[in-house]
Image: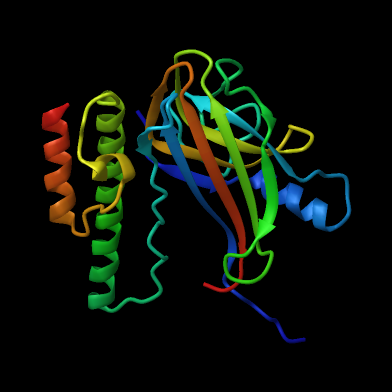
Amino acid sequence: MCAQTSKPTLLGYGELGKLVAGELATEVQSIVGLTGACTAAEASTFANPGGATKLAANGFTLVDADTVVSSQTTVANDTVELDHVFTWSGTQSVSGVAILNNDDDVVFYEVCFNAALEGETGDTLTFEGKMQFKLGS
Amino acid sequence: MVNAEVVGGLVITWGADHRDGNGTLIVRQASVREPAPINCIKPRCLARYIYKSLLYTMLLLYHQERVIYAEAHRKDIIPDKYRTGEDSPKTIRGNIWEIMKLKSRR
């Protein structure tokens, strides 16, 4: 069981800084399912995402997200919007997702669900994640 | 040199729908925002912040119970509000009542 949490990670902030500075870094692109006890934390890494376990089966393996675009929340293009549809290929408990860069080595942010989803083959999980560069309070 | 400061940062919002193979909604996750940080020390302001924090915690617990309930009854007919998360309780008392109801129905 887990409660809903979502956090940008410290490494994700660093990756964004390098990206804007034109240094070696890559953009938001990948998504992976998580299972087990999940609590989003700024200190999370690709190796240890929120204390949960990265899934590598049943349709939740690390993949490129269906779409990643900029969109508007407050001002034009202030948000990175990621959309993806997972399809269960076996019985699987899913407790959250992690959003990664193109190199698949840095988690930008992670999301832990209100409670784990107990899916069966053929079920779908439609995920939409937004990371807004928010100006002001 | 003039320092220009703004309060801002990265804000994460999200949504997730779990559907069965026929496209029927089993449950929709709810992204609940934390209350804004406190920036005052007047008693009334502190009390308001404490209330908002408690309401936030109870709302998280409500959505947790709601999702567990909807997942456990994926093939049953249950009120739409437990699948969609709308309308969620607006008060602490309302949340406690719904949480107790959901726990008893498990």
Count of numbered labels shown in the rendering: 0
Residue B37 drawn above or below residue A110: below
Residue located 23% across and 76% down the image: B43
Residue A66 drawn above or below residue B31: above
Q: Nearer the viewer, residue A121 or B103?
A: A121
Q: Nearer the viewer, residue B62 or A2?
A: B62
Q: Is residue A22 left or right of residue A7?
A: right
What colour scheme does the image use?
A: rainbow
User: Residue A19: horizontal and vertical position, in percent?
Assistant: 81, 52
User: Residue B61: horizontal and vertical position, in percent?
Assistant: 27, 42
User: Residue A73: horizontal and vertical position, in percent?
Assistant: 57, 65
Residue A2 drawn above or below residue B75: below
Quarter occupied by residue B84: top left
Residue located 28% across and 62% down the image: B52
Q: Is residue B24 left or right of residue A45?
A: left
Q: Which residue appears farthest toward the front when viewing the image? A: B22
Q: From the image, which quarter does the N terminus of chain A lie in?
A: top left
Residue A18 drawn above or below residue A52: below
